[in-house]
C-alpha cells in the first residue's frame, strides 16, 4: 500500500491567517504553486487558499487583495489526509470533497501537500485517465 507520505510534496509553506491575499499571491508566484495551506496563530491548519479563490472571491467582486486576510477565505473544517493514509483514501477524499489538493498531516502537524498530479505520477500509466475521471468535477 502506497501512503500519502510517500508521494506528497513535502515541506508545504503556509500563508498566515492574518496575511493579505496580495501576500498570498506573491508567495504562490515565488513558490510556483496554485494553493497554500492557511495556518493560524496557533499553528493549526485553518484551510487551503487557491489562486482561484483569490480571483473569484476577491478580485472578481472588486475587493482589494491588500485588504482581505487569507483567514477570511477559510471555510469550515479543512479537508486533510493523514500522512500514513493510503493513496486510495486520498483519491476517495478528493472525490468526496471535490478538491484537487490535500494538506497532509501527521498528528496536528502539516508535513506536506498531495495533489492530483502527485497521485497520477505514482500510478501505472494505464490508470491515470481513470484517476482524472474520478477526481474531475464540473
Image (cartoon, rainbow, N blue to C red):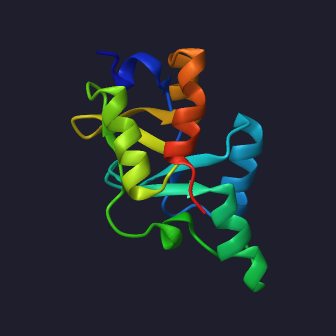
Whether 44 is drawn above or below 56: the answer is above
The answer to whether residue 112 is left or right of residue 126 is: left
In the displayed structure image, the side of residue 92 where residue 8 appears, left or right: right
Residue 103's quadrant in the figure? Answer: top left
The residue at the point 37 percent across, 27 percent down is 87
Residue 37 visible to the viewer: yes
Residue placed furthest toward the bottom: 62
Q: Position of residue 107 (x, y in %)?
A: 21, 35
Q: Position of residue 114 (x, y in %)?
A: 48, 33
Query: Where residue 49 appears, x then y in whole percent?
Result: 56, 57
Q: Nearer the viewer, residue 114 or 30?
A: 114
Residue 40 appears in the rendering: no
At a point 68% along the width and 65% down the height, the residue shown is 54
- In the rendered structure, the answer to whether residue 15 lies left or right of residue 110 reads right
Circle count: 0
- Kindly identify the residue that appears in the image at 47 percent across and 56 percent down: 98
Amino acid at each position: 500500500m502506497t501512503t500519502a507520505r510517500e508521494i506528497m510534496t513535502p515541506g508545504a509553506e503556509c500563508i498566515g491567517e492574518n496575511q493579505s491575499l496580495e501576500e498570498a499571491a506573491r508567495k504562490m508566484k515565488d513558490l510556483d504553486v496554485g494553493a497554500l495551506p492557511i495556518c493560524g496563530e496557533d499553528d493549526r491548519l485553518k484551510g487551503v487558499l487557491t489562486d482561484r479563490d483569490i480571483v473569484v472571491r476577491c478580485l472578481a467582486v472588486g475587493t482589494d487583495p491588500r485588504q482581505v486576510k487569507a483567514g477570511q477565505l477559510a471555510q469550515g473544517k479543512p479537508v486533510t489526509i493523514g500522512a500514513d493514509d493510503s493513496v486510495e483514501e486520498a483519491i476517495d477524499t478528493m472525490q468526496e470533497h471535490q478538491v484537487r489538493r490535500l494538506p497532509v498531516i501527521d498528528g496536528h502537524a502539516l508535513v506536506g501537500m498531495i495533489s492530483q498530479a502527485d497521485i497520477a505520477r505514482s500510478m501505472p500509466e494505464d490508470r491515470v485517465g481513470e484517476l482524472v475521471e474520478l477526481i474531475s468535477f464540473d
